[in-house]
Structures are given as C-alpha cells and as structure tokens.
Image: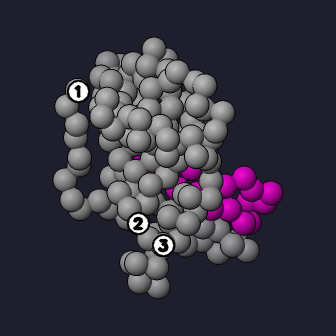
C-alpha cells in the first residue's frame, strides 16, 4: 500500500467519525475535552466549536499545540480503528469564521443556534492504527508544509 492509499484510508476514517478527544497543557495545568468536529481533508484540518471560556479553550489560547484521539465505536478489542494526532489549534479570524461555521453546521445543523467559537485544528502528525482479527497495522502521516496562521 502506498502513501496515497494510506492517506485516503486515514481520511475516510476521520470523515466517518464525529467525536475527537483533545488534550492540552499550559502553565502546569492539563485538561482534556471531547468535541464534535467537521473534517476538511484538502487542508487536513478539523473544525470544532467550543466555548471560549471553557477550561480547555483558555489553555489552548496559551498553548496551541494539542494532542488527542479519534476512535471508532468498537464492539471487540479484536477489531478496532483509531487515530492519535498532534495538532496546532487556533480560534478562527473573523473573516474565516462564518465560512467555517457554515461548513461545520452542514454536519451539525443544531449548531446554528449555538453562540460558540469555531476553532481550526490543523493536523501536524497522525498515527492511524487498525486491528482486524487480532492483526495490527499502523500508518503514519506528517505535515510537511508550514502551518497556516491567522492574526486576529
């Protein structure tokens, strides 16, 4: 299997799932949160909504490098899929937020009534693990271009 096929399989998995766990650490504090996300595969970016005043959001503003997981709901340890990731997360600039909100709300229409900040989680590194009938295989993906940033 070549890198393009591996990336396609990773993207299909991420696109199929809905909830990620992210962990953030700043100033000696650590916190994790579960969030719904919308995946934009061309840029390898996840969009999520979060209250700017939540504990994890406040920590992300101080330390935007986060890690986390996306795992499929499994019925057996013998058959499972999951992603571990490293990412750079930022709240969106005003000019980007409406477009990202529309994209996010396509998947989660109820979110239109929520007044929460939209965040861009730009994937840096992914480890995709799959177990099938006890056999394990892993794929790795690493972003090579420079991270996109937006000044507020």
Residue 140: x and y in percent read 41, 66
Closer mark to the observer between disc 1 and disc 2: 1
The residue depicted at 50 percent of the width and 66 percent of the height is 10
Foreground: 91 or 112? 112
Label 3 vs 1, first from the N-terminus: 3
Residue 135: x and y in percent read 65, 75
**Which residue is denoted by mark 3 in the rendering?**
8
Label 2 vs 3, first from the N-terminus: 3
- Circles 1 and 2: CB distance less than 8 Å? no
Residue 40 drawn above or below residue 133? above
Foreground: 62 or 28? 62
- Element under label 2? strand
**Which residue is denoted by mark 2 in the rendering?**
140
| Residue 126 appears in view | no
**Which residue is denoted by mark 1 in the rendering?**
152
- Element under label 3? helix
The answer to if 49 sits in the magenta stretch is no
Per the rendered image, the range of residues in magenta is 70-87
Q: Main secondary structure of the magenta part?
A: strand
54 relative position to 25: left or right: right
């Amino acid at each position: 299997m070549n890198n393009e096929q591996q990336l396609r399989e990773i993207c299909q998995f991420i696109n199929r799932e809905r909830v990620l766990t992210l962990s953030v650490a700043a100033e000696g504090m650590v916190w994790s949160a579960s969030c719904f996300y919308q995946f934009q595969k061309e840029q390898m970016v996840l969009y999520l909504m979060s209250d700017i005043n939540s504990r994890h959001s406040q920590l992300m503003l101080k330390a935007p490098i986060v890690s986390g997981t996306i795992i499929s709901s499994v019925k057996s340890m013998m058959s499972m899929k999951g992603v571990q990731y490293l990412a750079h997360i930022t709240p969106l600039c005003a000019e980007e937020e409406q477009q990202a909100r529309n994209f996010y709300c396509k998947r989660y229409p109820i979110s239109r009534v929520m007044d929460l900040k939209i965040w861009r989680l730009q994937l840096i590194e992914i480890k995709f693990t799959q177990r099938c009938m006890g056999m394990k295989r892993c794929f790795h993906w690493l972003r090579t271009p420079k991270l996109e940033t937006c000044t507020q």
